[in-house]
């Protein structure tokens, strides 16, 4: 697999047709129109929207997309609970900054510790290439870290200072949850079918409990 050769590149996702999301991009859309759409559909479910410099992406996620983002969220939250971490989830909240002409609704997002104006971690599932550059939107919102699940692996992007600005760098390990084993979560996603989500989460909790017990035992021996 060839990794992206620039800091802000998103992985291309051909994907099987049955898993593809339905994506439409409209151009030359004024911010006021996007803002009005966000306000009109506040507190209601509907297609997800992302906006960048006049381009408006409207996406209807596939069932597989929703299944994967939900399983990832459940595993992240199980990890936080087992480790005693303060992790606060905000789902697909709409985040936008008029001055940056950027806004979107993550698949899942979290603040580490206290709630903030923008999340510390955003999670995206990609089943279709194209659309607006969500990493650029996240950069303008100053989201510290973005995980993209695509092509059966995680792509971890960490926001780093670069001169007078900032850019995402592709990393092998999370910075906001440095001990979270994303490779293990990827294996769970690949091995779990859509009828055994809860069983997969329970098995993962048991694994985490065994690891915790092992750490305690080693400390006691020392």
Image (tube, rainbow, N blue to C red):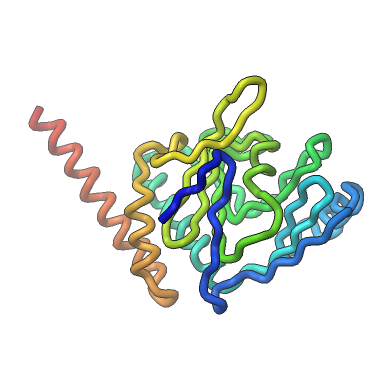
Q: Position of residue 2 (x, y in %)?
A: 44, 52
Q: Which sits in the foreground, 221 or 117?
A: 117
Q: Determine the residue positioned at 57% across, 53% down.
A: 108
Which quadrant of the rendered structure holds the N terminus? Answer: bottom left
Assign the C terminus to one quadrant of the image.
top left
Residue at the spot x=38%, y=48% of the render? 79
- Image position of 192 with respect to 218: above or below: below
Q: Is residue 131 left or right of residue 125?
A: right
Q: Residue 197: image x %, image y %?
A: 41, 69
Say which of 205 and 135 sits in front.
Answer: 135
Residue at the outermost top position: 164
Q: Is residue 9 above or below residue 73?
A: above
Quarter occupied by residue 140: top right
**Along the line of sight, the residue nearer the viewer: 173 or 8:** 8
Residue occupying image coordinates x 67% and y 42%: 136
Task: Identify the residue at image location x=70%, y=67%.
Answer: 23
Report the side of 99 relative to 67 (left or right): right
Residue 109 locus on image (x, y percent):
58, 48
Tell me: residue 9, above or below residue 67: above
Judging depth in this view, the residue of 141 and 152 nearest the camera is 152
Residue 38 in picture, x, y percent from top left? 81, 54
């Amino acid at each position: 697999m060839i990794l992206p050769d620039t800091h802000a590149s998103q992985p291309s996702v051909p994907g099987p047709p049955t898993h593809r999301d339905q994506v439409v991009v409209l151009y030359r859309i004024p911010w006021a129109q996007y803002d009005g759409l966000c306000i009109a559909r506040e507190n209601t479910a509907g297609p997800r929207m992302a906006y960048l410099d006049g381009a408006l992406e409207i996406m209807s996620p596939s069932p597989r997309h929703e299944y994967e983002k939900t399983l990832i969220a459940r595993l992240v939250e199980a990890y936080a609970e087992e480790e005693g971490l303060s992790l606060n989830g905000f789902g697909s909240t709409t985040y936008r900054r008029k001055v940056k002409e950027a806004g979107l609704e993550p698949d899942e997002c979290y603040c580490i510790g206290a709630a903030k104006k923008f999340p510390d971690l955003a999670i995206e599932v990609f089943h279709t290439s194209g659309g607006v550059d969500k990493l650029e939107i996240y950069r303008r919102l100053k989201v510290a870290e973005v995980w993209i699940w695509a092509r059966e692996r995680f792509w971890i992007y960490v926001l780093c200072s670069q001169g007078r600005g900032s850019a995402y760098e592709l990393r092998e390990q999370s910075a906001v949850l440095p001990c979270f084993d994303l490779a293990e979560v990827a294996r769970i996603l690949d091995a779990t079918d859509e009828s055994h989500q809860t069983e997969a989460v329970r098995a993962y909790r048991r694994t985490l409990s065994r690891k915790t017990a092992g750490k305690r035992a080693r400390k006691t021996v020392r």
